Image (cartoon, grey):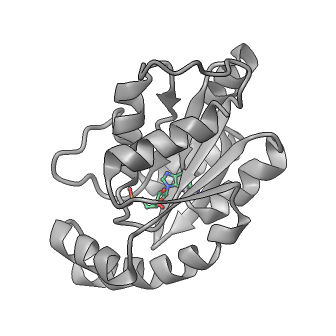
Amino acid sequence: MNNKIYNMKSKSLIIISGPSGVGKDSVINRIQSIDSKISLAVSVTTRKMRLGEKDGVNYHFLSRENFEKKIANSEFLEYAEYCGNYYGTLKKPVEKAVKSGRKIMLKIDIQGAEKIRKIYSDCLSVFILPPSIEDLKERIISRNLDSEHDLNLRLERAMTEIKSACDYDFVVENDIIDVCARKILDKIYE
Ligand code: 5GP
């Protein structure tokens, strides 16, 4: 693993946030390809599955009704509404990882990050920024995954999220995926 000596007592829970389209998935995949010991918590969502996504891999895709049942059963560590859909982190896998000291990443929005910080005050929170706002707009538009309505919501939302970057422990720009992933890994094992 890059011939580095890593500090094994480093933080167990790692929050990865950033505006839609910033490349969180690519950075997370790169982190995991460098260090396979770091897992990613699979969130639950009510949004529609996108082309190329798999149930149980990208998300657990649920109806609103079933999501609300999980809320009622207190199965979520946190959940939030984002652009009209529910997203939530399941308690069990996270608690299990943290208890055993295994590293686990949560790919969550700023509302989720705020809640997790209150529960796990010693977590590491990372915010990924785009190289520029123009670049982010181009990325969201060019990936062409969302309807025009969703796209505008996500662009609006992105501007709000970027303002919260200062609440995070570590802010990093995603210009080159590999460089961004390695900077986050250095921070995790600091
Ligand atoms: P997307 O629809 O693009 O996959 O995700 C939209 C937003 O929801 C992203 O900012 C993503 O990080 C966030 N998100 C994904 N899973 C969760 C979750 O479990 N909880 C919260 N609070 N946000 C999430």
Residue sitting at 44 percent across and 23 percent down?
A: 35
Give the image quarter of residue 171: bottom right
Pinpoint residue 110: horizontal percent, then vertical percent: 62, 64
Residue 127 higher or lower than 30, as above or below: below
Q: Can residue 155 be seen?
A: yes
Pinpoint residue 47: horizontal percent, then vertical percent: 37, 59
Q: Is residue 25 left or right of residue 16?
A: left
Residue sitting at 73 percent across and 41 percent down?
A: 123
Q: Nearer the viewer, residue 47 or 40?
A: 40
Q: Quadrant of the N terminus?
A: top left
Pinpoint residue 150: horizontal percent, then vertical percent: 32, 77
Residue sitting at 67 percent across and 21 percent down?
A: 7
Q: Is residue 117 left or right of residue 33?
A: right
Seen from this angle, which residue lies furthest front? 3
Q: Quadrant of the C terminus?
A: top right
Residue 145 higher or lower than 154, as above or below: above
Q: Nearer the viewer, residue 64 or 94?
A: 94
Q: Can residue 43 be seen?
A: no
Give the image quarter of residue 94: top right
Give the image quarter of residue 124: top right
Q: Is residue 79 left or right of residue 38?
A: right
Residue 165 higher or lower than 29, as above or below: below
Residue sitting at 69 percent across and 60 percent down?
A: 168
Q: Is residue 79 left or right of residue 35?
A: right
Q: Count up the numbered dots.
A: 0
